[in-house]
Amino acid sequence: MKKIYILLIFSLIIISCKKEKVDLIVINSNTYIVNEKFENAEAFAIKDGKFIAVGTTEDIEDNYKSKNTIDAKEQTIVPGLIDAHCHFFGLGLEQQNVELRGTNSYDEVLERLIAFQKEKKTSYIQGRNWDQNDWEVKEFPTKEKLDKLFPNTPVAIRRVDGHALLVNEAALKYAGITSTTFPNKIPGGEIIIKNGKMTGVLIDAAMGLIKSPKTSKQQEIQGLLEAQKISFSYGLTTVDDAGLDRSTIELIDSLQQVGSLKMRVYAMVSADNQEQIDYYINKGIIKTDRLNVRSFKVYGDGALGSRGAAMRKSYSDRENHFGALIYAPERYQEIAKQIAASEFQMNTHAIGDSANTWMIKTYKEVLKDQKNRRWRIEHAQVITKEDFRNFENILPSVQPTHATSDMYWAEDRIGKDRMKGAYAYRNLLNSYGKIALGTDFPVEQVNPFLTFYAATYRRDLNNYPANGFQMENSLSREETLRGMTIWAAFANFEEAEKGSIEVGKFADFVILNQDIMKIEGNKIPKTTVVSTYLNGEKVYSK
Ligand SMILES: [Zn+2]
C-alpha cells in the first residue's frame, strides 16, 4: 500500500513537472478568438507577452501552470481592439484644455475652470465649447468674474462654433493689449465693448488678437498618457494615429522605450510637407513591438458638414458649389509616385465622390499591377456608383459613427441619389473583401462599442431611426468585430502579430461585461470593459 502511495505521488510530480510554467492563464471564458473560422475558445495561456496555447479549460489546465490564473466565469473576451483611424495625440492635447460642453450657466463654466486649474496648474488656461444658448441668461458673458478668479493666469475659452473667444485681462496682457487700449477696428472681426471697455468677447478675426502659447513638451507627454488611459478603458490596445509629425512620432517612440507609453501605435506620417516625406522614405520602415511607421496620411479634401468635401456635381443645398481638393490634382500624383517607389503605404482622406474618384485613379496609375500594397482610402464617404468596383484593390478605412452623426443632414447636402453611395460600408466590404473600422476620435467618441452599434444597427443612441439608416449597408456583428481587430491589423500589415487570439500573437485581449455578439441589439452601446490586457499585462480594470 505504501509503495503504491509513493508511486502515486511520484507520478503526480511527473505530471505536474510536465506542465509548462507560464505567466498567465485564463480559463472558463467565452472567448471570440477571431481566427479564420471565427471560432470560440474557453481558455488560453500566455508567456513572454504572447499567446502560447488556446483551447478548452481542460486542455490548458492539463498542460500549463501559472501563479496567475483568471477564472473568467463565462465572461466574454475579444482580441485587443484596434482603432484604424483616430487622432490619439489630438485626444491627448484636447485633455489639456477645459471641456465646457454641456454647461448650464456661466457659473458652471467658472466652476469647471477652477476644478481644471486645481488639477492641472497650467500657466495659461484654454477651454472650448461653451454655448450661451444653453444657459439661463442667453447673453454673451463678460470677463469680470474671470478677472477676479484668475487675476494673473491668462484664460482663453472658445465658443462651441469656434467663432467667438472669451478672454480675461491677463490673456489680453499676455497678447500685449489691455481692455482699454485695443485696436479700433478689425476687418472681418468684432471686439465687443461695453462702456468703452472690452468685455473680453472677441468675434472671428478679432480672435487673432490673442496669442496663446504653444503646448509644452510636458503637456504633450501628459496628453499622450491621458489619451492612453482613456483608450485602455475602452479596450483599445492599438491606435492608428491618422497624421503625425516627426517630433510627435519621436516623442511616442521615446515614451514607449522607457515603458511609460504602453499603447501600440500605428503612426501615419503627415504628408503635408515634402521634407517630412523625404525624411521617412529615406529612413525606411520603423517597426518595434509597439510602434509601426510605414505609412503616410495624405489630405484629400474637406468634410461634408462644412461643404468642403470635393464633389463631382454641385452640392444640393448650395448652388454651384463643389468643395475642393486640398492640393492641386497633380500634387497627389507626385506624392503617390514617390510613395509607390518606396515600401510605404499611402492613406488618403477622401470624403467627396470627386476626391474618391481622383484618388482611385491616382492609386491605379502609380501602383499599376501591384496587388498587395494595401493602400487605403480613409473615410471613403461618398462614392459614385461606378467607383465601388475600383475598391477591389483599395482598402476602405471607415468610421461607422460618422454615418449616424451625419444622417440627419447629409441628404440636404448631396440629395437622395448620391446618398445611395454614401456611408456604404457593405458595398465597400464586398469590393475589397475586408474593411478597417475606426472612430476618428476626438471628432467622435472614443468608445468602440458605439462603432459596433453604428455599423450593425445604424441607429443613434436614441434608437433613431427605428429601422436603421440605409440598412442595406449595415455589417454583420462578425464582420464588425473583424473590422475592429483582424482586418484593422491587416490594414496595418500586422495581421501576423495581432488582431486575433491565436498562438504566437501578442497577448492583447479585453474582457467585456456582456456578450457583444449575442446581446439584444439596443443593448450594444451599454457594453463596458471589465479589463484590458496588453502584452499579457493588465493595463486597465474597472
Ligand atoms: Zn481623421
Image (cartoon, grey):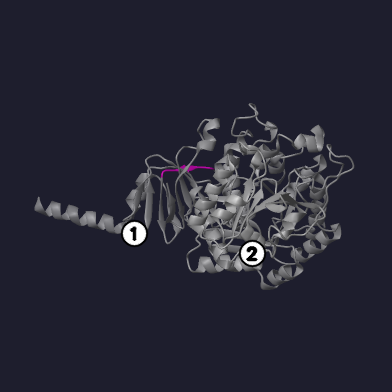
- Horizontal and vertical percent position of residue 391: 75, 47
> What residue is at 57 percent from the left and 37 percent from the top?
477
**In the image shown, does 2 or 239 lie closer to the viewer?**
239
27 horizontally vs 534: left or right? left
47 horizontally vs 453: left or right? left
> What residue is at 82 percent from the left and 55 percent from the top?
187
- Outermost residue to the front: 195
Do callouts 2 and 1 mark residues in contact (Cβ within 8 Å)?
Answer: no
Disc 1 residue type (three-letter): Lys
Q: Residues within 10 Å of mark 1 (few under 14, many from 20)?
A: some
Disc 2 residue type (three-letter): Pro
Residue under numbered circle 2: 213
**N-term-proximal mark, 2 vs 1:** 1
Residue 21's disc number: 1
- Outermost residue to the right: 320
Q: CA distance from mark 2 to mark 1?
A: 54 Å
Q: Is residue 39 magenta?
A: yes
> What residue is at 50 percent from the left and 33 percent from the top?
519
The answer to which image quadrant residue 215 occupies is: bottom right
Q: Is residue 456 magenta?
A: no
